[in-house]
Image (tube, rainbow, N blue to C red):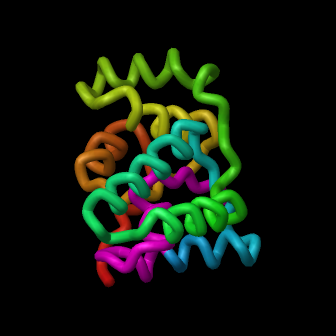
Amino acid sequence: MNDVIDASVAAKWYFPEEGSRRAGEVLAEASEGRRNLLAPDLLVAEFTNILWKKIGLDECRPDEAQAILDFFETDRPRLVDSVALAPRALELALRLEHPVYDCLYLATAIEYDARLVTADARLARSARVVLTEVDLVRGA
């Protein structure tokens, strides 16, 4: 099964917050070969921006963020080139009235016949208009 994960899920792999346990299960299942994780290459910039924000909020030290980024290099999903996804992402953004950067995740899911896995409730709502499978990561 193909799953597109967004930065909201990837961040939960490293920071204890609501949904971390469920996000960790997704990563573990991928490590076991039960899930094939994908994401647009935008994921790297968004994930790194989350680290920057965590440092600014004193939720993470710079050296910890660098270590997390090193782990992320191993854990991250297979990245898909956003250039090829841009036309579809723009079409989706206009149709759904939702930001293009989020629609890159939707475009990836459509292109690879994948389920979207996100912790972003707003994105999940928009995704359900165009995708048959959306997994909203919630809980502990």
On the rendered image, what quadrant is the C terminus found in? bottom left
From the top left corner, tell me how far across and down residue 19 is, in percent.
35, 74
How many discs mark residues in the rendered view? 0
Q: Is residue 95 left or right of residue 88?
A: left
Residue occupying the far right of the picture: 33
Front residue of 53/75: it is 53
Q: In the displayed structure, would residue 104 be above or below residue 49?
A: above
Q: In the displayed structure, would residue 42 be above or below residue 54?
A: above
From the top left corner, tell me how far across and down residue 76 is, in percent.
64, 58
From the top left corner, tell me how far across and down residue 128 is, in percent.
34, 46
Identify which residue is drawn at 44% across, 77% down: 22
Front residue of 31/10: it is 10
Front residue of 6/136: it is 6
* Residue 28 is covered by the magenta coloring: no
Q: Is residue 134 left or right of residue 67?
A: left
The magenta span reads: 1-23
Identify which residue is drawn at 37% across, 79% down: 16
- Residue 21 is drawn in which quadrant? bottom left
Identify which residue is drawn at 29% across, 68% down: 58
